[in-house]
Amino acid sequence: MGFLRRLVKWLIGLTLFGVVCVALAAGGIYYYYSPQLPDIETLREVRFQTPLRVYTADEKLIAEFGEKRRTPINYDTIPQRFVQALQAAEDARFFEHQGIDIRGLVRAAYQLGTTGQIQSGGSTITMQVAKNFFLTREKTFERKFIEILLALRIEQELTKEEILELYVNKIYLGHRSYGIQAAARVYYGSTIDELNLAQLAMIAGLPKAPSAFNPITNPSRALERRNWIIGRMLSLGYIDELAHDEAISQPVTARYHGADIEVAAPYVAEMVRSQLYETYGEDLYTEGLNVYTTINSEAQLSADAALRFGLLSYTERHGYRGPEQHFDIEALSSETLETKLKATPSYGGLTPALVTTVAEQSATLLLPDGTEANLPWSGMQWARAFKTVNAMGPEPEKAADVVEAGDLIRVRETEEGLRLAQIPEVQGAFVALNPENGAIQALTGGFSFYLNKFNRALQAYRQPGSNIKPLLYSYALSNGYTPASIINDAPVVINDVSLEGDWRPENDNGSFGGPTRLREALYRSRNLISIRLMRALGIKPMREFLLEFGFEADKLPENLSLSLGSADATPIQVATAYAVLANGGFRIEPFFIERILNSDGEEQFKANPKLACANCPERQQAEMIAAEAAELALAAAAAGNPIAAVEESEIFTLDGRPLAKRLLDERTAFILHDMMRDVIKKGTGRRALVLERTDLGGKTGTTNDQKDAWFSGFNTALSATAWVGFDQPATLGRREFGSSAALPVWIEFMRDALKDVPESMLLEPAGIARALVDPATGLLAYPGQEKVINEVFREEDLPTQVAPNPMQEQQAPTSEQLFR
């Protein structure tokens, strides 16, 4: 007995000594490492790396930029079932311990001592937070001690709810998803609160090994892990048998979901990314900025559809170029053919398809998803063989004239079924903006961003052709011309060194109209009248006037060819210039970022664009003062005492919004607006009559050899430009013009954009007069004249001379009769 008593005392003493040594060692370690530990308070201010998100004006997601997909959430929005699943998987005693789990640490120490490695760290959720936010991933004894110390400190300074919130937002869960909300979207296309128990358990099983237990790449192991977690939830009392059995029976439903793009506008998204990168650099992709653009989601979808419609229509008018590839389907296995088909990307809604059999007037296709489809005769009978832009082969009589088995082709969905298609070689651009403030409503820079990222709406400098004529006419109207002014549409020879010799310009149809009113010259797009106007008014002043609309000086030639649109301009520059005509004469600036919010929802930027706002009292007062100053200056000059002109200063509304500069007098703008509506009523834009609106004005544009086709048009609510052409300038074909290639795009867009929108036109300003004029002379109609035109004028420009009455001239007596 004595021996046993002594042994017990010795063991107790040894134990106490060991405890003291451990305590001293722990204290020493704590005091050694304590000064090196980071400040736990920083966790309260942590900012998760969150991607840049770009939205439309109506808050629909356009794009997401950033390596990490993450959507941070608050603890209150975490489903309780997920918290329980996570505890079952990672840390059952999370809400009970003080940051460390002694049993888990003992297990980790044993593994380190026996194998030299820590295989299952026994880390609590708090310790994982310490590791994920402050430490490296190396597995050493020293790092483990620091991790434990940090966990203890974290538990002292943060609540359990704060710790868990940090954890679920930080962890990597595979497929670029960080945090449980991102994982829910990636694997199930839903938010975390919409998932069932089986799906929550699947996500809870990912932190341990996001690759090994991934339900997409390794579904069998993921299922095993999920079911283990569900079973553990049952043993811990979190769920009952019924819930357990129902969850266990659920199949693996996870599949990859990309970003929840609601409106595909990649050209706009890249514009946003590129502009903001200049300010934020690489931080742009991790700061969690939410950018709200000016894009209207419905208008954007209409713009994309309209441009693709126009380009595909052009392509069909010029014939079928044949299959993209041809395979020997007898020599290749079905698996190989399916692999090749799946590897072929879709562009612009054109799906790749493999022709497997050809009947008399139909073909059977294999689609990328492995299903078969029928291509009817109605979907391929258009496909005459392409020869040149001006020539095609004969009309096909049977399906075999168009396709054969083994052809890799493209098809698109139509109301009549599948239709044979081909990726257009021709390209285009479309942009629409609000003429009141310059906000871009819709923009597309080509047939498909993923086929070619070149943004033609912003980057393609092309000759606008006759699209420039309304701007020249506005200058003429500002300098004494009227819609009834007569200009001779007759041949002219111009000798100009800059034009390399004699230049003999012609009208597009080669004819000449003789004396022509300015209004008619515009809607008939007479080239020679534009040239005579510029020559009469001066190349230099007219060129300077065009620069006011936003064109670039080095892109405008300094010769008479400018009158026919030989400048270089981008579609957005043309649309911006036409906005001046639409809004009553004000120079607005295009913009596409409305506001920017940081990850906390705080506003970092808000656009403050210049407003047209003709009726703003601040503008009316400023214009009245400017008019009085101009009168004083004229009076002083007449008296021989000239005074310096008052420089025009920027005008602001009372709430700080800047007002746009006026380029056109309100009466000039009104008259030109009226003239441009005739382009659609009876000129080169007559196709737009299908829209059945009277408030639309516009102008076609076609350059030499039909290399560029344009249509730009507007009402007071919208200014839009469509351009069609090849990236490397080449003729579109001798039968292609702005009215046939570009105008249909504009019409398709406007049909949707102006649906249910009331007509709107400029209000008639004071100082406008109307009179009946003779269409041949532009003079006032003589009494009783039948064929007359009701024309609009400035009051001071109203004609005073009456047109001669031909009947009176015929009946007038000759001199012989008078003196017989």
Image: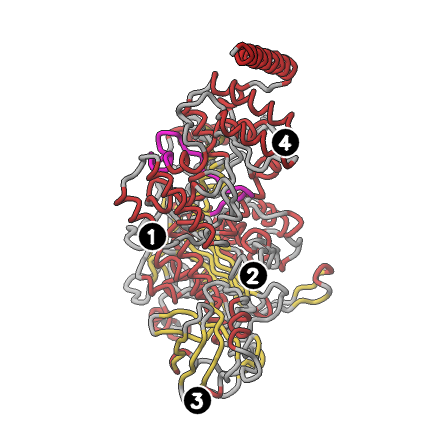
**Residue contact between numbered discs 3 and 1, judged by CB atoms under 8 Å:** no
Tags 3 and 2 in contact by the CB under 8 Å rule? no
Q: Indicate the amino acid at tag 1.
A: Gln
At a point 49% along the width and 45% down the height, the residue shown is: 64
**Which residue is depicted at the point 41% across and 42% down?**
436
Mark 1 or mark 4: whose residue is earlier in sequence: 4
**Residue 150: x %, y % from top left:** 55, 21
Label 1, label 4: how many angstroms apart (C-alpha)? 42 Å
Q: What whole-number distance in Å separates the C-alpha atoms at marks 4 and 2?
A: 58 Å
Q: Position of residue 630 (x, y in %)?
A: 50, 31
Front position among marks 2 and 1: 1
**Mark 1 or mark 2, which is nearer the start of the sequence?**
1
Residue at image location 48% in from the left, 49% down from the top = 214
Query: Which residue is under mark 1?
Result: 250
> Which of the labelled discs sits on residue 451, or is there none?
2
- Which kind of residue does numbered mark 2 sit on? Leu
How far apart marks 3 and 1 lie (CA) works out to 51 Å
Task: Give whichever of discs 3 and 1 has the lower sequence position.
Answer: 1
